[in-house]
Structures are given as structure tokens and as C-alpha cells.
Image (tube, rainbow, N blue to C red):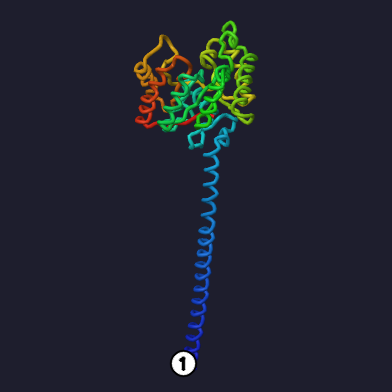
Amino acid sequence: MEKGYSHSRASEYRSKRNRRRLVLAAILLFIVGCITLITIMFSDSKPAQTQELAKKTDSVAHDPSKVKANTDSKGKAALPKDETGVEDGAFVEKYLNQQMLGQKPDGANGKKVAYLSFDDGPSVTVTPQILDILKKQKVKATFFIVGKEANENERTRNIVKRIVKEGHAVGNHTYSHNYRYLYPHRKVNTERVMQDIERNNQVLKSILGPDFSTRMVRFPGGHMTWERRDPQGMAALDKVLLQKDYHQVDWNVLNKDAEGKPKKAAALINQFIKSVKGREKAIILMHDTYGKEETAKALPQIIEYLKKQGYEFKIMK
């Protein structure tokens, strides 16, 4: 009996052990099957996700109007995420304001960016030369246009069309550029400035189509100049600009082609190199109005210098 009982116990033990092995094997097979299924599902969805992302990226790259202002919790411009060669004007405005206050700008991220900008045009003499150079160098710029000059004749209107057709940005530099009218008695006249800005917008729409708009504004003489001379008047104007989603931008680099006596190209280049030193985000002021042929002559070397220093180029919108 003892021997038969032991044999029975051993048989029962082996049976239980085999059942445990079968259960464990079934669990392992179930886990492996789940992992395989998840892997297959992820692999199937990844191309679609990649394709969708490519579509979104391509859409932004080919439609700069889709680049929106990034804002922080207070509604102020934050560090932009756009990498397509179009910079949000709100970002540039905030960057310059913080820099002028002696603060470290939010966008100081180690990346060198150059924003070429040209004021007071278009002219039939200088602007086409600058556009030819930019095309050859494969670089884009922002043109702050004076409405009176743009609407002078068919040639100037066609130059404005060419600016946009070749991928450059257009900013508003008022219609008249008349200091005595805009800043009577050296005071900022908000009503006149806004009327001049809106009148320029209408001129640009008549040239570029009713759907054209720009958020970029640069004041004749610069915001910084009139802020020092008439802080209260400029504060009132700033409030109106904010309500209408305009963004004013000055500059932090210049070649002094509008200061003092006329300069040759070599002097403009030397002045530019001094001014751009140490600038991570370089908002560069130049002019394409009549009499600025030396600016056009200096431009190729200015662009080559920026390229050698590791700057990328962006337009402002």
C-alpha cells in the first residue's frame, strides 16, 4: 500500500506540474501576441502620421500667412517655433524692446539670425539693383514701403509686385513719411500717424490685391527716437497699434547710409561690421530710396560677411 500510495502521489505531482507549465506557456504566448499586435498597429499608423506632419510643415512653408504669433500666459510674444525663414513680427518687436531695456531677450537662444530690411522705397533706381542682388545671393529681406513712393507710377507699382513675387516681405513705413505732418512740433500725433498707416495699407492693397495685409510697421525716424522725445505720445500710439495687431520694429544694426554725409560702399561696409558685432539677432537697417546706390554696391559684401559669420536669413511678417 505504501508503494502504491507513493506512486499515486508522484503521478499527481507530475500532473499538476504539467498543468502549471501549460498555463505559463499560454500566458507567455498571450503576452508575445499582444506585443506583436501593438507593434504591427504602431508600424501601420506611423507612415500616416509622418505623411500628415509633412503636409502640415509644407503648408506652413508655402503659406507664410499661417505663421501665427506665439504668446505666453500674459498674451505677449513668446519664442517662435517657425523655422521656415519667416519670423513672427511680434517676436522681433519684443526681442528689440527687451534688448533696448538692457534685458536678456526671451529669444536669445544662441542661433544667429539676420533680418535685412530696407526703408523709404521703392525707387526705380536702387530697389531693382537690391532685388537683383538678393536673388543672386538667394536671400530674402523685408521692405518697409512708403505709400507715396509705391504709388508714384506704374514702374514703382510693378517693383512692389516684384518684391512680393520674389518672396520678400512688405512692411508699412507710412504713406507720406512727412515728419512735420506726423510729428508736429516734435510731438507724436496718434490720429495722423494711424491715418497715414491706413492710407498706406490701401495703396498696398490697390497694388497687391484686396487680400494683402501686413502687421509690420516702422516709424519714420524710428520708434526709439520718438519714445525719447515724446514718451506719452508714443505710449498712446502704441496702445492703438496693439489694439489693431500691428507690430512696430526698429533695428539694432545699421550701416549709416542715412546719417551724416553720403558714404562710399567701403565706409558703409565698415560701419556695418562694427554695428553687427556681438548681435545674435541682427535687425539690419538700410535704405533703397533714391541716392542710395552705394548701399546697393555694399550689399553683396554685407551678405557674404553675414554668411561667413554663420547667420541665417529671415523675413519679418
Indicate whether 30 appears above or below 240. below
Indicate whether 31 appears above or below 43. below
Indicate whether 37 appears above or below 118. below
Q: Residue drawn 48% across and 92% down?
A: 2
| Mark 1 nearby-residue class (10 Å; few <14, some 14–19, many ≥20) | few
In this view, which residue lies farthest toward the top?
A: 185
- Return the x and y of residue 34 as percentages of the image width and height: 53, 65
Report the label total: 1
Query: Between residues 76 and 288, which one lies in front from this camera angle?
Result: 288
Residue 210: name its quadrant: top right
- Return the x and y of residue 39 as percentages of the image width and height: 50, 61
Q: What element carries label 1?
A: helix
Q: Residue drawn 57% across and 17% down?
A: 148
Q: Residue drawn 36% across and 30% down?
A: 309
Q: Quadrant of the C terminus?
A: top right
- Return the x and y of residue 145 as percentages of the image width and height: 54, 21
Query: Between residues 81 and 202, which one lies in front from this camera angle?
Result: 202
In this view, which residue lies farthest toward the bottom?
A: 1
Side of 89 where 239 appears, left or right: right
- Return the x and y of residue 88 as percentages of the image width and height: 53, 31
Query: Which residue position is annotated with label 1?
Result: 3
Query: Between residues 315 and 7, which one lies in front from this camera angle?
Result: 315
Residue type, label 1 = Lys
In this view, which residue lies farthest toward the front?
A: 154
Residue 114: name its quadrant: top left
